[in-house]
Amino acid sequence: MTAKPELNSDAGLKKLDDYLLTRSYLTGYKASKDDRTIFVCLSDPPSSQYVNSSRWYNHIAALLRTSGISDERSDVIVEGSSSITEVAVSTPNAADSKDGDSNEEEEDDVDLFGEEMEEEKKTDEERAVSVKASTKKKESGKSSVLIDIKPWDDETDMKKLEEAVRSIQMEGLFWGASKLVPVGYGIKKLQIMCTIVDDLVSVDTMIEEQLTVEPINEYVQSCDIVAFNKI
């Protein structure tokens, strides 16, 4: 029977680092409860030899600081063949069982990224509405999309970030006006308009496959669709 590496062991940290090689977050392209779950299980920041884990850890730590939520630690076991987000936390002692239900309820109430996940669900529904199925040959419909693009920190060069975003060119995509909007702690996000031909461009695919991958993810931390309207 193969032993399960602890997350804080070299084997566990190596597995986390490999998993984050092509990802900004543990699941999806926005911070979620999965990120906080793994973060609080790390006893110390990953060393510099784990480049991807260290980058991810520092970013999640910054989000937790701005949210004002504690980062209580716990031990975790990582399955060698399963997703890094599938963790087994040690069972509470019998002496603590009386408080188990109340503690579980309190943890359920702590939803660091809950609002973002609800917004993501809404934007998924809005994007679904934009899908057009037609068997007749006619001119494709168009949509106007407003996107929020957030940098990693206040040191990110926003001019280069915008240049990187506008460098994405494809048939049916037309970039429009943009502006920088303060989000706090000296950080500004890029808010940019674009017009798309519905049958040619998927904004969801563009975000996942171009806006949040190399080399653009050097500047871009995450993207949100603020408005999606048919023209």
Image: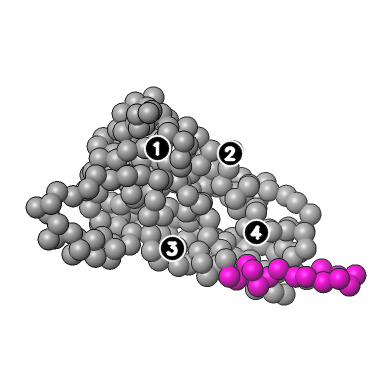
Q: Which residue is mark 3?
A: 116
Amino acid residing under circle 2: Glu
Residue 50: mark in rendering = none
Part of the protein shown in magenta: 125-140
Element marked by disc 3? helix
* Residue occupying the point 58% across, 70% down: 125
Q: Which residue is mark 1?
A: 79
Q: Is residue 60 above or below residue 52?
A: below
Per the model, the C-alpha gap separating discs 4 and 3 is 18 Å
Q: Quadrant of the C terminus?
A: bottom right
Q: Earlier in the sequence, mark 4 or mark 3?
A: 3
Q: Is residue 114 visible?
A: yes
Per the model, the C-alpha gap separating discs 2 and 3 is 24 Å
Amino acid residing under circle 4: Val
Amino acid residing under circle 1: Glu
Near mark 2 (Cα within 10 A), the count class, few <14, some 14-19 or many ≥20, is few
Per the model, the C-alpha gap separating discs 2 and 4 is 17 Å
